[in-house]
Image (cartoon, rainbow, N blue to C red):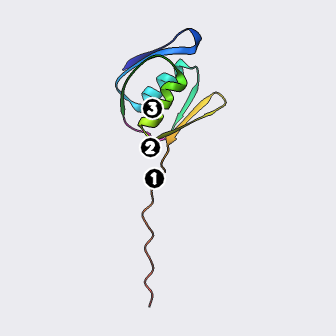
Amino acid sequence: MSQSQLGAGGRLDVELKAADLPDALQLVASAANKSLVVGADVKGTVTLTMRNVTVEEVLDRIEKDFNLSVKETGNTLVVTNAAPAVAPPAEKASQP
């Protein structure tokens, strides 16, 4: 998949090549020593190279590119789709 290395000052280098999105998120969370919860509807493949960035910068980039919502609760990152699934419109009952 790739690599992520946390350097001095909490900055890291990230290189992802055709990585499964949940796996990429796990890599970033691990680099930040955070737990991770990923919604079942979070899918995709990411290719990304970022140098000397913070975990927040990496998450912001992924969040924007994939229309995700990333929330931090305590030591846990919770990642879901930002746009909820749209339910089909309800059929109107026919009137007699």
Query: Which amino acid, by three-letter code, is at mark 1?
Result: Ala
Q: Which residue is mark 1?
A: 85
Main SS category, magenta section: loop
Q: How crowded is the residue under tag 1: few (<14 C-alpha within 10 Å), some, or many (20+)?
A: few
Question: CA–CA distance between discs 3 and 2?
Answer: 15 Å
Q: Which residue is mark 2?
A: 41
- Depth check: 67 or 89 in front? 67
Q: Which residue is mark 3?
A: 62
Contact? badges 2 and 1 (CB < 8 Å): yes
SS assignment at label 2: loop
- Residue at left offset 54%, top offset 26%: 56
Question: CA–CA distance between discs 3 and 1?
Answer: 19 Å
Mark nearer the N terminus (2 vs 1)? 2
Say which quadrant the C terminus sits in. bottom left
Mark nearer the N terminus (3 vs 2)? 2
Query: Which amino acid, by three-letter code, is at mark 3?
Result: Ile
Region in magenta: 39-44
Between marks 3 and 1 in the image, the one whose residue lies nearer the viewer: 3
